[in-house]
């Protein structure tokens, strides 16, 4: 590394946030970029550690020490080449990834890890600002046609890779615009949608066709794609929401988180939305579920003018540090406080919702909870135990269910006769991503279940290699760990 002692000289820094009272006035991103000098110092913190465990922590296998060194030396163009060699969309992951690479950073064993995610975002933004991110259409075409179903990060990554191989790629998206949950699930204060649109312009210039407003399995039969395309790659999201089957779940005011977030994103983007307007303005909001989606609901509720926001999590409060049974470099289940949590939400752990209460006219007025604990029995899954005498009723006008997803819709699988795994995901071989139907492949959430954006991009890239091999007999598209030609 260029600065051998950098990790001893510089403290970890990331882009600071705008004050809460300022950022709650709109839905724009609210981080304030560090100076170029500060970013070089952050790149200098990357150690000459011998074995960079950050590589194994990153699902994409990003060449992290290499681009950190390039940043330290001020060679931003080189850093952009290195980063794009393994990651099609670093502007997405640099904003939204929980950074498993940082948990695997060697420096993180006893100090604050290198701020890899923040460095990644700055590299990507510098590349766009300098005009280095340009369309690179393939020089020749194979004549093979591939249908990619779903335009989330898995579908977009696969489409770009397959297009680079020279195939004619059509991406089918049921919503109004491409992006999947990047557009309709992630709030604009975490990633403004022009970040997606500028990348889509590049993909279209490279020759990828997008057909939006087309719901494969409903508007178009999946079997029709088999007739029209040489291969099909299914990259839909895990969109079947997990319900909360308790009394009162059908009351007006009990809302699935993705309905709430998706509608607000459409509102911010000026896109008409169907159904009843969902708003937290002036309401006591309770978000049930302590993950990223729950956090997004919190930040959105505050921006809509909620009276109060509380967050319930059925699991116990995790420790602030790394648990003893989750040693480095594994991902630890420790307390994580998001920017939305810091905007004023009250968080409650080890709490289970038992019933929703209404006013007699079908409108939500409150809910009943009970405190719980988890009994651990060796060799068995932890058992949930309710604590007697801890029942409590809470005032609530809007309950947002952020409980995760149970799988993807079954219409395509049913029409094509695809096998499912025990978790109702589409069963596709990890060796070639192909389903039981020849020429039909699956990747991303639809194959492995609900997961991270960085995993979706990785899945799309891997699947593209195998689709290309199926069509051509072999493939020069890279697999994880092999990198790609330095192109941005």
Image (spheres, helix red, strand yellow):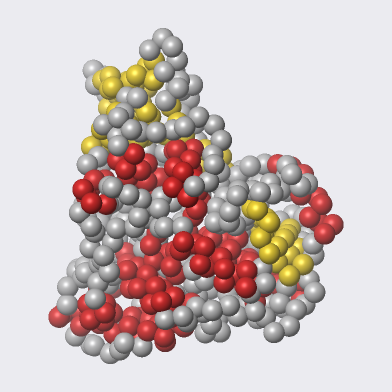
Whole-percent x, y for residue 192 in the image? 42, 57
410, above or below 483, in the image:
above
Whole-percent x, y for residue 219 in the image? 74, 44
Question: On the rendered structure, is 377 left or right of 477?
Answer: left
- In the image as oriented, which residue stretches furthest toward the left? 9
Q: Quadrant of the N terminus?
A: bottom left
50, above or below 370, in the image:
below
Kindly identify the residue that appears in the image at 77 percent across and 77 percent down.
142
- In the image as oriented, which residue stretches furthest toward the front? 270
For residue 209, say whether it is visible: yes
In front here: 222 or 259?
A: 259
Question: On the rendered structure, is 117 left or right of 443?
Answer: left
In front here: 274 or 270?
A: 270
Q: Quadrant of residue 104?
A: bottom left
Question: On the rendered structure, is 187 left or right of 212?
Answer: left
Whole-percent x, y for residue 412 in the image? 71, 46
In front here: 298 or 333?
A: 298
- In the image as oriented, which residue stretches furthest toward the top? 360
For residue 258, say whether it is visible: no
62, above or below 184, in the image:
below
Kindly identify the residue that appears in the image at 73 percent across and 42 percent down.
218
Kindly identify the residue that appears in the image at 24 percent across and 59 percent down.
17
Whole-percent x, y for residue 183 in the image? 50, 53
Kindly identify the residue that appears in the image at 38 percent across and 29 percent down.
399
Q: Quadrant of residue 67?
A: bottom left
């Amino acid at each position: 590394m260029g600065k051998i002692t950098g990790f001893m000289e510089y403290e970890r820094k990331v882009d600071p946030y705008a004050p809460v009272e300022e950022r709650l006035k709109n839905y724009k991103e609210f981080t304030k970029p560090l100076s170029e000098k500060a970013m070089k110092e952050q790149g200098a913190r990357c150690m000459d550690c011998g074995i960079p465990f950050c590589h194994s922590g990153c699902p994409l296998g990003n060449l992290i020490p290499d681009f950190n060194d390039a940043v330290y030396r001020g060679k931003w163009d080189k850093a952009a080449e290195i980063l794009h060699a393994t990651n099609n969309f670093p502007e997405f992951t640099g904003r939204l990834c929980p950074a498993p690479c940082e948990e695997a950073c060697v420096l993180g064993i006893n100090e604050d890890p290198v701020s890899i995610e923040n460095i990644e975002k700055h590299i990507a933004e510098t590349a766009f600002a300098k005009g280095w991110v340009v369309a690179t259409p393939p020089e020749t075409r194979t004549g093979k046609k591939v249908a990619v179903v779903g335009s989330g990060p898995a579908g977009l990554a696969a489409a770009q890779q397959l297009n680079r191989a020279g195939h004619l790629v059509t991406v089918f998206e049921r919503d109004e615009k491409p992006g999947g949950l990047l557009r309709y699930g992630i709030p604009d204060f975490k990633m403004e949608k022009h970040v997606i649109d500028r990348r889509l312009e590049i993909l279209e210039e490279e020759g990828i066709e997008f057909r939006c407003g087309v719901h494969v399995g409903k508007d178009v039969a999946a079997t029709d794609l088999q007739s029209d395309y040489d291969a099909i790659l299914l990259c839909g999201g895990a969109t079947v929401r997990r319900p909360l089957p308790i009394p009162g779940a059908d009351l007006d005011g009990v809302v699935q988180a993705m309905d709430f977030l998706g509608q607000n994103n459409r509102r911010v983007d000026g896109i008409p939305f169907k159904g009843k307007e969902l708003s937290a303005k002036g309401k006591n909001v309770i978000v049930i579920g302590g993950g990223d989606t729950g956090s997004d609901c919190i930040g959105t509720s505050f921006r809509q003018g909620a009276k109060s926001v509380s967050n319930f999590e059925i699991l116990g409060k995790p420790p602030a540090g790394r648990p003893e049974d989750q040693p480095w470099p594994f991902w630890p289940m420790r307390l994580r406080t998001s920017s939305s949590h810091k905007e004023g939400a009250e968080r409650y752990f080890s709490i289970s919702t038992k019933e929703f209460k209404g006013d007699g006219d079908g409108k939500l007025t409150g809910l009943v909870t009970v405190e719980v604990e988890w009994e651990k029995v060796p060799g068995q899954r932890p058992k949930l135990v309710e604590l007697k005498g801890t029942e409590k009723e809470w005032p609530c006008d809007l309950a947002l269910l952020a409980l995760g997803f149970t799988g993807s819709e079954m219409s395509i699988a049913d029409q094509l006769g695809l096998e499912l795994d025990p978790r109702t995901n589409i069963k596709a071989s990890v060796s070639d991503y192909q389903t039981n139907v020849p020429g039909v492949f699956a990747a991303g959430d639809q194959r492995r279940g609900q997961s991270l954006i960085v995993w979706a991009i990785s899945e799309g890239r891997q699947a593209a290699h195998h689709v290309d091999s199926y069509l051509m007999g072999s493939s020069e598209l890279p697999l994880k760990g092999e990198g790609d030609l330095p192109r941005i």
